[in-house]
Amino acid sequence: MKQSVRLLSAALGLALAGLAQAEVAVIVNPGAAKAPSQAEVANIFLGKDKSMKGYDQAGWNATKEAFYTKVTSKNEAQLKSYWSGLVFTGKGQPLPSVGGDADVVAKVAGEADAIGYVDAAAVNDSVKVLFTLP
Amino acid sequence: MMKMKLLPLAICLASAPAFALEQGEYRLNYFGSVGITHLGGEDQGRSYGVSGQTTDSWRGDQLSKFGAQLTYGLTDTLGVTLQATAKPLQDEWQANLEWAYLSWQANDQLMVRAGRLRSPVYMYSESLDVGFSYPWLRLPDEVYSQVQLTNYEGADVVYTLPLSYGSVTFQVAAGQAKNRDYFAYDDLFSIDYGKLFGGNVSLATNDYGTFRVGYVEADISTTIDGVVNAFGTPTYRQLLELKKDKGKFTSIGYQYDNGTWLTANEWTTRVTENDNNASIDSFYLMGGRRFGDFLAHVTYAQLDENEGRQNSWTLGLNYNIAPTVVLKTEYKRVDTSGGYDGVFVRGKQELYENELFERSGGLAGVPARNYDGDIISVGVDFVF
């Protein structure tokens, strides 16, 4: 009985987690010169590694939340505070941002050095998936 | 068909390097603080703080300020940045141009800036006026009263190297700052910083926080003097004269924030040749924890000089009203020992009376005493 309750709650937990956040895919152009690791992707999206052009998603959504918490270990408040630190010390400007998944896919498909993150369901043949985040 | 041809061109234009603003592109950012602060537990009229604006009446001038920053891309790699602040200082609003520089992004890692720049003295120096960038309403006064200079004219080089576990940034700065205000003994004096040179290294790790080591030196020239009442006779006194005497300032800092727990710590030492003082050492240790939109934090700070010691405990509770708006409340208990004024403001006359007491063996004057106070501050910091 105990066992089955535990199993049930585990299954329920998984189902809830699945509902709460879809998979996030980090995508690059099929002709990209390199395949950055997760740590390098973090540096690109924190403005420290400028060897590739990161496209951010405007506003705040579930995909963005999942991407930043998993790749850079920063939540929304931390991320905003991080960028205001860079902006007001003259050391950086936030990455350009576009409307949503479809726009990110279009940008990444169009530029050889572009990189972005989207809901895995939005990925198509025009881009290459670098890795997905569960 | 026409559209098909234009599309690759548009993409080509959009794919300028990511590290600087594109030509003609601009960003406007604003920041500000609105707050009131009050010193209790001291005698009437006693003031406290780096500019002496914390007193026994609730005042908004110590904490309130507004700023705007404009960044404009002249070309894809050359940009101009202007930052202006408005602050109430000694009973009037003063507009200051804190940043006014040209920046050149030489490559992915190297940036060169020239013009008026913020002096990179402390860990939070370059965002000193942006309260949103640090957890307190009042930066720990023990440390942040050490160097009053906020900007200089010159150039710096910022080199950032991405690492597998974070990044490391090197910054080297050189320049000068002439004819600046220096607040001492409840008065403003003119001060020159010549041959200003500084360097710092900041190692930002993804998981273990950020370490920073910085050093700044300058040839300081100033005359701190005034007229005191000596036994009924107005008498001129010179309290300090520096003629291109070297001032050296070292700071070591560490910050960590994992979203729940955070800590910020800084240790500084300042030496000025020919000021009759050994090194002035100060530090603070801060720890905090977030509970949802709340942040509770505690700070211990200490300042040691020849004359004595100031130490303080600060308790703070912040609430994130919005992702870029924070309501902050703070209680700070400050004590000095050794007959030392610390960050409390002691006027010229008082100093004279204290020195007279000591020199006359207690026959005249007033003995130097210790100070203590309870400082309460409430305010809102924001950026947009």
Image (cartoon, rainbow, N blue to C red):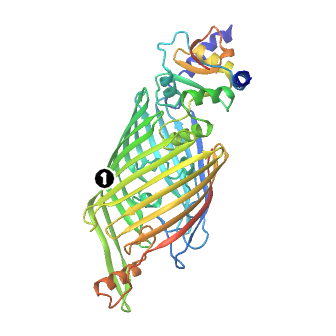
Frontmost residue, A95 versus B351: B351
Residue B362 at x, y percent in the picture:
32, 88
Residue wearing tag 1: B217
Residue B251 at x, y percent in the picture:
36, 50
Q: Is residue B180 left or right of residue A115?
A: left
Q: Quadrant of the N terminus of chain B?
A: top right
Using a 10 Å C-alpha cutoff, classify the residue at mark 1 as few (fewer than 14 neighbours), some (14 to 19) or many (20 or more). many
Q: Please tell me how many numbered marks the rendered image carries.
A: 1
Frontmost residue, B172 versus B48: B48
Q: Is residue B314 left or right of residue B105?
A: right
Residue A43 at x, y percent in the picture:
49, 28
Q: Amino acid at mark 1?
A: Glu
Judging from the image, what secondary structure is the residue with disc 1 in? strand
Q: Residue at x 68, y 18 (%)?
A: A102
Q: Quadrant of residue B6?
A: top right
Q: Is residue B313 above or below residue B383?
A: below
